[in-house]
Structure formats: C-alpha cells, structure tokens
Image: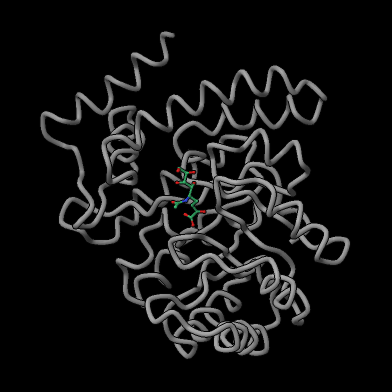
Amino acid sequence: IEDFKGVIPAMLTPFTKDEEIDEAGIRDLTEYLLSFNIGGLYLTGSTGETFLMNEEERKKVLEIVMDQVAGRVPVVAHIGTLSTKAAIELAKHAESLGVAGISSVPPFYWRHSEEAIINYYKDIVESVDLPMIVYNIPLAGLMSVDTIKKLAELKNVCGVKFTSTTLFEITQIKDATPEGFMIFGGADELASSNLAIGVDGIIGSFYNLIPDLFIQIRENVKNGNQAKAEELQRYAVRIIMDVLKHGSMVGAMKSILRKAGIEAGYSRRPFLNFEDERQKEVVNSLLSIENI
Ligand code: NAY
C-alpha cells in the first residue's frame, strides 16, 4: 500500500449501451489509464457507479481490472455497502485477487450511530488481512475528525480518503492520527492544495478524463513550483465545473471519452448518457475551454 500514492483515478466502470458490464471497455480504459504515470487505481467507488451494481457485478469488474493490470500498479477496491456481511464478502473476494488494499464508505442511509459505524469497520478489518482506507465523503454522511481518530486505532486501518471541499480537516486528521497514517485528497477541485499540504495521494473522478493535467500539477507541487501548480489547477477547475454543470458527471465524462476514441462505455440509468444532440454540447464546452 505504500506505493499507492500520487495521482489515482477513481476508475469509471464502462457499461454497454444496454447497461451490461462492458469487459472490453473496462480493459481498454484500464490500458488507457495505465499509459499515464498514475500511482494506482481505485475501483468500484462512487465514480465506478458501485451502488448501481449488485455484488456479483462488483466482483466481476474487479476481476477484469486485476487481470488487465497484472500487477503494474497497486489497486484498491472499494468494498463498502450497507450491510457488514456483504462488505466482508466483497473484501474477502478482493483479498483473493491480490488487491493492495480495500476502502469503504461508512454504512449510510440509516444514519447509524458512531458505535455502529466503528463496528462496521472493525468487523471488516478483522475478517481480512488487508490495509483499509476509510472513505469519508459527505454523500455517505461525513464522519468527524474524532471518529476518524478512533478508526485509525483499529488494526489495519491505514488511511483515509477525505472528499471535502474544505482543507482544514486534513490538517486536523494529520494531527489526530499517528505518523504514517495515509491521507488521500478526494476533491479534484482542491488537488493542488491537497498536494501542497502533504497528502499521500489524490483519488478522484477527473483523473479518468484529464490525468495528465493532474500529473503535471503534482510534479509542479513536488518541485516547489506552487504558482505553476495553481495556474494549472485553475484550468482544471474550469474543466471540472464545465463538466459538472451538465449533471450526471460520470455519464458526461464517458461521453467526452467516447468522443475522444476511448472506450469508456456508457453509464447505468438513472445517470444520463449524453449520446444525443447534447453530447455535442458536453464535448464542445470542454473544447472551448481548452482554447482559453
Ligand atoms: C470515488 O470513489 O469515485 C471517488 O473517489 C470520487 C471522488 C469524487 N467525489 C464524488 C462525490 O464523486 O473526484 C471527486 C469529484 O467527482 C470531483 O472532485 C468533482 O466534484
């Protein structure tokens, strides 16, 4: 897991037009992403439309990617779901495939108590021998720094992926957790800032679409050229906002990638796919930005 760092795409899951798992597309997209200097792949997370898949499908996607990657970069599998029992099954399956680690959102929807949430993570990490990256994201109910601190005390909880558009909590988490506890920035809008405050890596959706731009941002931060990193980040934010304004972010990104000849496939409903007239609008707005 120590090698899991830098720019890490939260990989899209290509589906066919009729919403089946698109094995060829998954393999193509994997190869495309591996052609950049990425630090790993984060599988079946929000960007991977994980909650639109059943458990068998989630396993299948992971199997295909693990086979295609063949050890070239570390893969972390998001195994989170509403039921501890199901999450453990996914975790064991991921372990059998040789992933570098697992990750999970807290169980959401029922607004569980802190105790139930901690038990959820505890039960998972005790059932496998894999590092766990806790996935803290407002969509699943943002956990407090104090809860993260408690989770960090569990065996094998090695880090947190913090997806928020505020920065200060990352510094609080750093202060509250032991040296070496890994922190991943999850908001692509804040990539340069997250890197500047010393996150181990950035995991996000837009590293499927414009990985090179974020790799350059990281290089500039690493080389002490923060001003250049900020300039590139401003450009990235324009692209992000322009894609987000269409809604159905994953559908919009896939539409752009398809147009660019990358077999990223389609999204599952209710996400929109922008394959009609609106595809032009999605793609054109991006192209007009590129000319700025
Ligand atoms: C995942 O599991 O797919 C992620 O890590 C995604 C993190 C993303 N957050 C959400 C809510 O999708 O990359 C970000 C996000 O799409 C981006 O910052 C644009 O807002």
| Camera-nearest residue between 35 and 281 | 281
**Residue at 34% across / 46% down in the picture?**
250
Front residue (pair 262, 214): 214
x and y percent of residue 47 in the render? Answer: 42, 53
Q: How many marks?
A: 0
Q: Which residue is nearer to you in this view: 86 or 159? A: 159
Report which quarter residue 36 is drawn in.
Answer: top right
Q: Nearer the viewer, residue 234 or 90?
A: 234
> Which residue appears at 34% of the width and 13% of the height?
288
Which quarter of the figure is the N terminus placed in?
bottom right
Is 118 rendered above or below residue 164? below
Percent from the top left, x then y, of residue 193? 68, 36
Residue 49 x, y percent position in the rendering: 36, 59
Residue at (51, 55) in percent of width and height: 68
Q: Quadrant of residue 55?
A: bottom left
On screen, residue 137 versus residue 182, left or right, reads left
Colour mapping used in the image = one colour
Residue 24 pos. (x, y %): 34, 51
Q: In this picture, is 249 found above or below 64?
A: above
> Viewed as shown, does residue 289 lie left or right of 15?
right
Is the C terminus in the top left, top right, bottom left or bottom right quadrant? Answer: top left
Instruction: Single out the residue that lies furthest toward the top.
Output: 292
Residue at the extreme right of the image, as rendered: 179
